[in-house]
Image: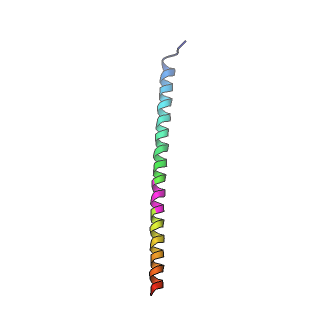
Amino acid sequence: MVMQGPITRARAKQLNQQEKTMKALETSTDQEEDQRGVQVKMEAQFYSETTFSAFRTSLH
């Protein structure tokens, strides 16, 4: 026996909510990856400048 009506609508609502939750988690993960990428670039720039500055100072 196939049940229809409110149960089908409830299941559709549940699936819709799960999809929204998955998208929110994906967005959150993407933002975290972007933040990590920026942090890595800033650290690389800092260490490059620090190393270059130390090298330049040692030449004088």
Residue situated furthest front in the rendering: 59
> Vertical placement of 17 versus 26: above or below?
above
**Dominant secondary-structure state across the stretch colored magenta:** helix
Residue at far top of view: 1
| Quadrant in which the C terminus appears | bottom left
From the viewer's side, name the closer residue of 45 and 11: 45
Give the total of numbered labels: 0
Colour pattern of the rendering: rainbow
| Residue 9 included in the magenta stretch of the image | no
The answer to which of 49 and 17 lies nearer the viewer is 49
Q: Give the range drawn in magenta.
A: 34-40
Where in the figure is residue 25, as x and y percent of width and height? Answer: 49, 43
Q: Is residue 8 above or below residue 33?
A: above
Q: 37 or 15: nearer the eye?
A: 37
Q: Position of residue 5 (x, y in %)?
A: 48, 18
Q: Which residue lies furthest to the right in this view?
A: 1
Residue 23, percent across and down? 46, 40
Q: Residue at x 49, y 21 (%)?
A: 8
Residue at the image position 51 percent from the left and 21 percent from the top: 7
Examine the rendered structure and indicate whether residue 10 appears above or below residue 36.
Answer: above
Residue shown at 45% from the left, 63% from the top: 41
Farthest residue to the bottom: give it: 60
The residue positioned 47% from the left and 26% from the top of the image is 12
- Quarter of the picture holding the N terminus: top right
